[in-house]
């Protein structure tokens, strides 16, 4: 007899996301398998993020939509942690406030976590504000599979599209780095602590989340700073294995090919402005 499907909470950290939060939350509501709860954690937003979310709550009273505020400190890590601690599902899904998960995302997460040995899972992304989106999804999937092959047994979580078993979170919670200076990859930090505890992380190609391609607009300097977060995260944990540099090598290698993609995105923005 197959294991029962676990309950899935969805945690969405948000800071000044009035333009994206509706699409994100509506996608989380309109699932083939209902989420146990959808938690938006507002981190000191100064725009209408709260008002937009509360309007959705009023429109969908039967959905378990929870608004929470994390005002103690600014940053993705304390905001994520606040939401994870608040979640009551057996599995905690984590996406960004500009994410638009596919309609079967919760269902795919539930299927993945039917295997009780799985502690965490991650999947590919579809850039919804770019042309040739499905081709882009296939490319993203191939890149992530390549990274898994190069890093061998070490699997990285991707913060915009991940899920972690509540019990696994509770096991590593006290050890995760606060990253008060915002120099690391918070999702890689999670991956490291899961690995240190021998907790299994898997990659699920069918667990797809849409996200904005706005990262592609970064300057070369900003992009390099973003990629080198891997290096700073490893240094914090005393990790020196050469194979863990694989994501950095891959991301730097694809940067020249992003130029035409950025040009297309810019033309699309100009046409719609």
Image (spheres, rainbow, N blue to C red):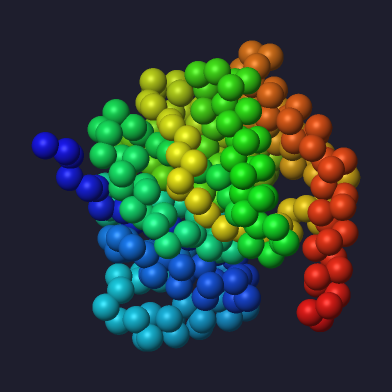
Closer to us: 127 or 70:
127
Q: Position of residue 157 (x, y in %)?
A: 52, 37
Closer to us: 165 or 182:
165
The residue located at (52%, 22%) in the rendering is 154
Question: Quick check: can you spot residue 265?
Answer: yes
Q: Position of residue 254 (x, y in %)?
A: 79, 37
Image quadrant where one finds the C terminus: bottom right
Answer with the quarter of the image where residue 232 lies.
top right
Closer to us: 142 or 77:
142
Q: How many marks?
A: 0
Closer to us: 125 or 199:
125
Q: Is residue 95 above or below residue 171?
A: below
The residue located at (68%, 24%) in the rendering is 246
Q: Is residue 201 above or below residue 19?
A: above
The residue located at (22%, 48%) in the rendering is 5
Image quadrant where one finds the N terminus: top left
- Which residue is at the far top? 241
Q: Is residue 56 above or below residue 181?
A: below
In the image: residue 202, left or right of residue 32: right
Q: Position of residue 50 (x, y in %)?
A: 50, 77
Question: Quick check: can you spot residue 236?
Answer: no
The residue located at (62%, 44%) in the rendering is 138
Answer with the quarter of the image where residue 105 lies.
bottom left
Q: Position of residue 106 (x, y in %)?
A: 36, 55
Q: Is residue 138 above or below residue 244?
A: below
Answer with the quarter of the image where residue 131 lies.
bottom right
């Amino acid at each position: 007899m197959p294991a029962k499907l676990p309950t899935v909470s969805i945690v969405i950290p948000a800071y000044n996301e009035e333009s994206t939060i509706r699409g994100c939350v509506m996608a989380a509501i309109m699932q083939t398998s209902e989420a146990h709860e959808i938690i938006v954690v507002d981190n000191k937003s100064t725009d209408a993020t709260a008002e937009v979310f509360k309007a959705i709550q009023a429109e969908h009273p039967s959905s378990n939509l929870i608004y929470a505020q994390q005002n103690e400190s600014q940053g993705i890590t304390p905001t994520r942690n606040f939401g994870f601690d608040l979640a009551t599902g057996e599995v905690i899904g984590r996406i960004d406030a500009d994410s638009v998960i596919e309609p079967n995302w919760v269902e795919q997460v539930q299927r993945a976590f039917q295997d009780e040995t799985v502690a965490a899972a991650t999947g590919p992304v579809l850039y919804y504000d770019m042309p040739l989106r499905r081709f882009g999804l296939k490319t993203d999937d191939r890149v992530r599979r390549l990274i898994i092959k190069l890093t061998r047994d070490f699997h990285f979580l991707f913060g915009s599209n991940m899920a972690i078993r509540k019990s696994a979170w509770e096991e590593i919670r006290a050890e995760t780095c606060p990253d008060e200076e915002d120099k690391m990859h918070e999702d890689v930090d999670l991956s490291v602590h899961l690995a240190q505890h021998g907790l299994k992380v898997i990659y699920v190609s069918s667990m797809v989340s849409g996200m904005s391609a706005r990262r592609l607009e970064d300057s070369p300097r900003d992009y390099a700073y973003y990629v080198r977060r891997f290096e700073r995260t490893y240094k914090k944990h005393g990790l020196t294995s050469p194979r863990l540099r694989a994501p950095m090598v891959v991301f730097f290698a694809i940067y020249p090919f992003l130029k035409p993609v950025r040009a297309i995105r810019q033309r699309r923005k100009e046409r719609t402005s």
